[in-house]
Amino acid sequence: MRDALLGWYRRHRRDMPWRREVSPYRTWVSEIMLQQTTVAAATPRFEAFVRLFPDPAALARASEDEVLAAWAGLGYYARARNLRRAAQEIVARHGGKFPSDPEAVLALPGVGRYTAGAILSIAFGLPHPVVDGNVIRVFSRLFGLRARAKDPALAAEVWRRAAKLLPPEAPGDWNQALMELGATVCTPENPDCARCPLKRSCLAFRDGAQRELPLPEPRRTPTPVRWTCLWIERGDEVLLWKRSPQERLLKNLWGLPEAGRVEARLGATLARVRHSITHHALEVELRAATLPTPAALAPAARWTPRARLRDALVSSLWRKLVDAEGRPRRAARA
Ligand code: SF4
């Protein structure tokens, strides 16, 4: 099984920037970016990110706003904040050099068992397994494990088997091969068993059960959320609002103020947009609004030139709203 999968991986692996030049720093950034982002979307963003912050020291020196701007549109912004905090720890505790001690890697903010295993095996060649959603699906089919993919008992069993199967001479290639197989051949909906290097050992393939495993998750209905956001202008500037750390969504990020957060007189509806954020289905109405005069601004508010809005607003929700607000103006100019 090892020879078949490793041989297949070495012939078929996809070309990715973090595979062309491997270092612990690049592997770490790519793994964090890929946690909730597809390879196609992550590739250009990864290249831009490491150009801007080529090593832990450069990332540690950057301000939080600079790192968030480089992460703009990728979502799950805690990942970017943790990257910066971890880079600061690497500089403070490890002299700017990425640690190879498993405990030190796991102690970094935002690094869990999966990311630590990926960095240690791929960049340092150390025998640590990795288990992500792809590996869980492949193992569930390969060994006929009848459980839901998110069942913690299945994850524990897959970690155990992954550690046992790991070839000590090629842990990085093996881990990447398993994930690559799950991403390109043993896919969730239509596993391409005819092309699979593991088909001779696969219990699900033998039993024709490859589409049944892992067992389906119960469907989760997204929580509906309705917001009214305000478009408040002063000449060529627009009022932005920093959301508090206690917000349910988009905490600690600059955005357009929600109605009720600033004292304002509401005007016409400018746009309505729909947007999804982690199991929340948002419906956002954008209303023109004016401040009473004289207006005292809270510290969480700041005026931002219209031309700089897209740089200042990190979440794609705000960018959608800014685009929707500008559409009639652009149409009038055309
Ligand atoms: S044979 Fe099919 S189900 Fe089994 S591991 Fe390969 S692609 Fe997945």
Image (tube, rainbow, N blue to C red):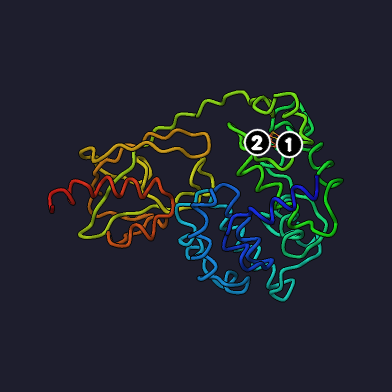
Read off the residue under disc 1: 199
Disc 2 on helix, strand or loop? helix
Q: Residue 240: x and y, percent?
A: 35, 54
- Sequence-wise, which precedes: disc 1 or disc 2? 2
**Rendered position, 67 above or below 280:** below
**Pointer 2 residue:** 194
Q: Where is residue 51 in the image (x, y as percent from the top left)?
A: 51, 71
Q: What residue type is labelled 2?
A: Ala
Say which quadrant the N terminus sits in: top right
Q: How crowded is mark 2: few (under 14 residues within 10 Å), some or many (20 or more)?
A: few
Q: Dividing the image into four equal quarters, which quarter contains ligand 1?
A: top right
Give whichever of 207, 44 is nearer the camera. 207
Quadrant of the rendered structure where residue 303 is?
bottom left
Residue at image coords 59%, 55%: 14
Residue 43 spot, x, y in % from top left:
52, 58
Dot 1 amino acid type? Lys
Labels 1 and 2 touching (C-beta < 8 A): yes
